Image: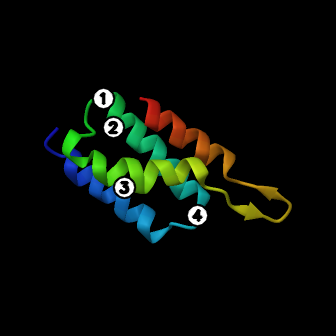
Amino acid sequence: RLCAHDVLDGILTQLERNKNNDTAWHGTCLAMGELARRGLLLPQRLQDVVKPVLLKAILFDSRNHHHNKGAATGGAGIGAHVR
C-alpha cells in the first residue's frame, strides 16, 4: 500500500508519454484494474483515474491501415471501471 501512489503515478506518466499508442492505453487500464482488484487504487486518487483515463479508454479508437485497434483498449477500460 505504501507504494500504490508511486505506482499509479508511474503508470499515468507512461500513458501521458504514449497517449496515442493503443497498447499503452490497454496496459494502463489492465494495471489500474489490477490495482483496484487488490484494493490499492486509493479513493483519493479516483479523481485522477476515472474521468481522465478510464472513460477516455472506453471510447478510445485507433485506426491502423484497414482496421480499428481500440476494441481491446475499450474492453480493458470497461473491465478496470467495473472492478
- Label 1: how many Cα within 10 Å (few below 14, some 14–19, many 20+): few
| Residue highlighted by disc 4 | 21
**Cα–Cα span, label 2 and label 1:** 5 Å
**Cα–Cα span, label 4 and label 1:** 26 Å
| Residue highlighted by disc 1 | 38
Q: What residue is drawn where x is 53% and y is 37%? A: 78
- Label 2: how many Cα within 10 Å (few below 14, some 14–19, many 20+): some
Q: Earlier in the sequence, mark 3 or mark 4?
A: 3
- Front residue of 48 and 2: 48
Residue at the bottom extreme, as displayed? 17
- Label 4: how many Cα within 10 Å (few below 14, some 14–19, many 20+): some
**Cα–Cα span, label 3 and label 4:** 14 Å
Secondary structure under the numbered disc 2 in the rendered image? helix
Q: What residue is drawn where x is 68% and y is 61%? A: 62
The numbered mark at residue 35 is 2
Q: Position of residue 74 (x, y in %)?
A: 60, 45
**Cα–Cα span, label 3 and label 1:** 16 Å
Secondary structure under the numbered disc 3 in the rendered image? helix
Q: Is residue 75 left or right of residue 32?
A: right
